[in-house]
Image (spheres, rainbow, N blue to C red):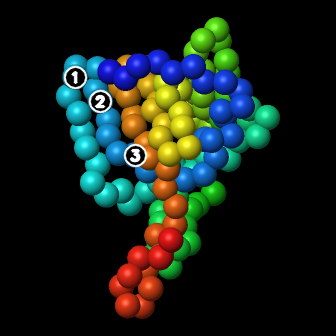
Amino acid sequence: MSCQQKITPEDIKKINGYWEIEKVTFKEGADKEYKMNENFDYFQIANNKGIRRKVRPQFNGTFLFNDDFENVKVRFKGEQVFLDYTTAYAKWTEELIRLSDDEMVLKNDQNNEYEYKKAGPINLLEDGKKTK
């Protein structure tokens, strides 16, 4: 399992944007690696409140999404930081373990850790070259 990082209120703005899951570490110690994802998580948080939604990157650099999203509140409790999610159907919490400009680790209530890398639009030119 990963080490706990001191995350400050100023760090929270780093959550904003598109995140692609790279790996899940299950509490039993097994890992599941993701080579490619059809969906990314998009976060938009300001003043410790915002949304998370699933988006699907397209080859032209845009994202498809529907009207579904989760409300997110950032909660600091001592040295720990939590993301509290609510929808019309459920409430749950994940602990924010690590956060940088290009990496994020969340731990759910079953102690499974989700490692994300920062992602951006996928945009392929007509010649098949990837644009930035």
Image vertical order of residue 116 relative to residue 93, above or below: below
Image vertical order of residue 57 relative to residue 75, above or below: below
Q: Which residue is label 1 attached to?
A: 29
Taking the spot 57% from the left edge, 19% from the top edge, the residue there is 6
Q: Is the C-beta separation of discs 2 and 1 under 8 Å?
A: yes
Disc 1 packing (10 Å; few <14; some 14–19; many ≥20): few
Taking depth in this image into account, of 90 and 48 the one nearest to the observer is 48
Q: Which residue is label 3 attached to?
A: 21
Q: Amino acid at mark 3?
A: Ile
Taking depth in this image into account, of 16 and 55 the one nearest to the observer is 16
Give coordinates of residue 56: x percent, y percent.
48, 63
Task: Name the secondary structure under disc 2.
Answer: strand
Q: Give the Cα distance between marks 2 and 1.
A: 6 Å
Q: Which residue is label 2 attached to?
A: 25
Q: Give the Cα distance between marks 2 and 3.
A: 11 Å
- Quarter-of-image position of residue 30: top left
The reply, left or right, for residue 55 in relation to residue 27 is right
Count of marks placed on residues? 3
Give coordinates of residue 111: x percent, y percent.
37, 20
Task: Name the secondary structure under disc 3.
Answer: strand
Give the position of the N terminus as an image quadrant.
top left
Taking the spot 52% from the left edge, 66% from the top edge, the residue there is 121
Task: Name the secondary structure under disc 1.
Answer: loop
